[in-house]
Image: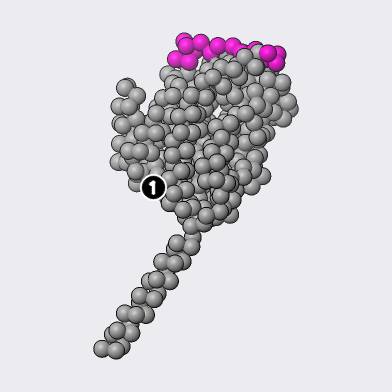
Amino acid sequence: MNKYIGSIIKGAAVAASLGIASSALAQDEVTLRWGHYLPNSPFLEVEQNFAKKIEERTGGKVKIEITYAGGLGKGNEIMTLAGRGAIDMASVVPGYYADQLLFIRAFQIPFVFDTPAEAMTLSRNSFAEIPAFSEELDKYNVKFLFHQPLGQYYLTGPDGNCDTVAGLKDKKIRSFGADIPKLHNAVGAVPVTIGVGDIYEALQRGTLDYSFINAGNIVTNRFYEPGKFSCGPVMAITGHLITIGKRAWDKLTPETQAIFMEEAKVSQQAYLDWIDAFESKAIEDIKANGGEVKEFPEAELAKWKDMAPDLLGDWVKDMEGRGLGEEAQKVYDQWYAWLGR
């Protein structure tokens, strides 16, 4: 009997010590390091405001330090670094992790969304109602906070013949991820995978004929200097995910975690409200700085779409080969139901 009682007491002591250790993970004061692949610019205003609001609402107990331009790791490294706890937060481009974020990469499949608002509506609905999206991030030990919308994409280069499908044949166009290259191949262009930070020099040297990026980034990175002509819009996709590593998340008190999620929701809506005004101003800024913006006609865009494969359908087939076809088909059906197509 004494041995039995002794084992109970010992077990209770161990459990108590584990409880203390668990609660000790949460910290009243913490500084989180956020790794960003983009340079510091007004284009990241919403994310910067998120960091400020967290500090304000926690009375300065939680500070977030953003390091830009790959200072804490390259764009294709920072998700893994956040998951391992080497950094705390990361802005994650799905296209940079096409073989890891198999579901989330679908947000960057071209010719699915017509506008940033459509893309962001599907992002919000997907993370809320389709478990596969959050579960995928769980595998890499990071948690989704909110999603960056992107303005519509333009072709930018020194040659003004970027407003027809025929004009793109044999041109070297900036590309990324698993699906954007298929879009360029469809019109006989040559996709060149290259990071945002390398586009300017590539346009200067002629290793790229056209950039392929949204108007806000054209202005932020002054791509109108080596590439006078911008033709578009061509497509809309979502941008990067703002994530926090699970190890960093566990350092936060439940009250602070609630603040994070509240501010993430506010930031998501703020990004949508902000993007249209910012991108419209970006177009005007391109023109004001000597750039020329040419419309990519609807008829030419229709030709491009006809020439391109069903990229979302191809994604489903690829997922079938990975044993995820049933879940992918549900995404396909649900997305087009939400889009009313």
- Tell me where residue 85 appears, x and y as whole percent: 55, 55
Q: Is residue 295 magenta?
A: yes
Percent x, y of residue 257: 45, 48
The three-letter amino acid code for the residue at tag 1 is Glu
Residue found 31% across the figure and 32% down from its top: 334
Which of the 4 quarters of the picture holds residue 112? top left
Q: Is residue 137 left or right of residue 46?
A: left
Quadrant of the snapshot with the N terminus: bottom left
| Residue 150 in sight | yes
Quarter holding residue 52:
top right
Q: Is residue 168 visible?
A: no
42 and 179: which is toward the camera? 42
Residue at the location (31% across, 88% down)?
Answer: 3
Q: Nearer the viewer, residue 120 or 180?
A: 120
Q: Using the image, determine if residue 278 lies above or below residue 86.
A: above
Where is the C terminus found, in terms of image quarters?
top left
Q: Is residue 102 left or right of 44 when viewed as pictured?
A: left
The residue nearer to you, when weighing 141 against 281, is 281
Above or below — where is 155 with respect to 313?
Answer: above
User: Residue at coordinates 54% horizontally, 19% vertically from top-left?
Assistant: 277
Is 178 in front, or is 72?
72
At a point 32% along the width and 27% down the height, the residue shown is 338
Query: Which residue range is magenta in the image?
Result: 288-303
Find disc 1 in the rendering and name its residue: 135
Residue ranking furthest to the right:
205
Q: Please, what secondary structure does the residue beneath circle 1 have?
A: helix
- Is residue 246 rendered magenta in the image? no
